[in-house]
Amino acid sequence: MNRAQKFLAVFLGMMVVFFGGIVVRVWAVKPPSAMKLSPLAVGEYDPAVWGKAYPLEYASYQKNLEMAASPTGYGGSAKVQKAEMQPEIYTNFKGNPFSKDYTEDRGHLYAIEDLKESKRIGPTSKGACITCKTPYVEQFYKESGWGFANQPLTELLDQSKHPVSCANCHDPETMKLRVINPAFIEAMGRQGIDVNKASREEMRSYVCGQCHSEYYFEPGTSRVVFPWDQGTTPQQMYQYYATKPNGFQQDFIHPDSKTPILKAQHADFEEWQNGVHAKFGVSCADCHMPYIRENGQKYSSHWMTSPLKNLDVSCMPCHRDGTDQLYNQVKATQDNVWQLQHTAGLNVAKAHEIIAKAGNIPNANQEQLTNARELLRQAQWYWDYVAASNSMGFHNSVQELHTLGQSIDLSHRAIDAANQAVGNQL
């Protein structure tokens, strides 16, 4: 056998071994196939029961018990008071429970526990507060419609044995994604969207948006309403609030400046909706619940956390810049938003102080003071819209930096108006 024949024999032998291994792997030692459907009983809200049927998803869901700071230092799941980094909170929310207790959210598994421990909750708190804290809201709404929103919160807490979990987002019989928050369903309906006809990809964001959104309580009924009738930008929502929808005028009146204040709530879905990822068809779950492979089985991680903790699977399927570059980009964005957010918050606090002083001066021009308070109301809404969101501006940095710039400008205009009201004495 000459040299060429020997080389060919070795090469063919290697091919036999290589392709033989593939044949064995594919046909003889097949990896686990796609997830097997295991229907559960309607009304089963215990995630541990779901976990017996879907152990990989449940194991990742349990990781939400971990408490840690964000990789960039902003947000995270450690239970710390936001006022530690933003002391202006004490001034801007004076007269409102958020000035007493405004902690970082610890995650879905702590939803009921944190609600019970919150200093913002008292004996008169309404059942509406539980809408996004437990899958039992499905049961409450079936039994009473929106009547549950006006029931005592303490009664509903006693009935809620489990926090946000599998049943909030999955039909127990088919495992299809679903939305159970009636406020989200109604808000989307007013936009002509039937969530029951949504695609699976759309649902991968809707299940998050049903809770991670801005809302208010309808006066008298405490019904939860999403303010999207004129659009979902902070500017469009402010215009909606200006119409005093359903008789709603403000969340509280600031005791010093006498300004009627709107308290923003985690508008993460709205940020994403108007941001670059949504425009390119990237869902919330693509980044925050990426696909994982374990023992040959593909499943969606239910550790709902910062994509920075899973850059390889959360970001790299689309981006090719390297994990270090991606982290640095996010960090720079959040640094910039934080700096402008903090500046905006301090300017809002200063405006409260100046308007309060102007209001205490005899013969102050009331028309100009009213104008100053309207400018401050808008300035605080724009600041709070960004500050209350969880992405620290990353969901839509262009919009959020613009919104914070507007807040700063409006605060200065409010201060000028208050000064004019008292003949520039301040």
Image (cartoon, helix red, strand yellow):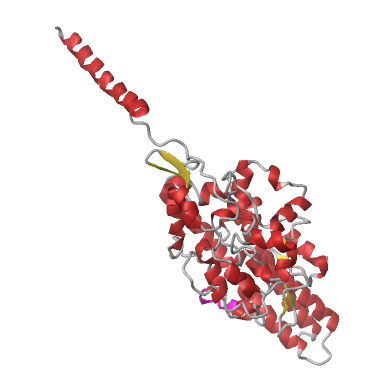
Answer left or right for 171 relative to 184.
Answer: left
Q: Residue furthest left?
A: 1
The image quadrant where one finds the N terminus is: top left
Residue 132, image x, y percentages: 62, 62
Answer left or right for 424 relative to 325.
Answer: right
Relative to 271, does residue 295 appear above or below in the rendering?
A: above
Closer to us: 49 or 75: 49
Q: Residue furthest front?
A: 41
Q: Is residue 224 magenta?
A: no
Relative to 126, does residue 23 appear above or below in the rendering?
A: above
At x 61% / y 49%, what residue is drawn? 205
Q: Is residue 84 magenta?
A: yes
Q: Quadrant of residue 380?
A: bottom right
Closer to us: 89 or 17: 17
Residue 367, image x, y percentages: 85, 80
Relative to 287, does residue 414 appear above or below in the rendering?
A: below
Q: Residue furthest bottom?
A: 362
The image quadrant where one finds the C terminus is: bottom right
Q: Report the span colored magenta.
A: 83-89
At x 16% / y 10%, what residue is drawn? 3
Residue 172, image x, y percentages: 57, 49
Relative to 410, does residue 29 appear above or below in the rendering?
A: above
Report how many numbered discs are placed on residues in the image. Answer: 0
Q: Quadrant of residue 208?
A: bottom right
Answer left or right for 4 relative to 366.
Answer: left
Answer left or right for 60 relative to 350.
Answer: left
In this rendering, does residue 253 appear at all?
yes
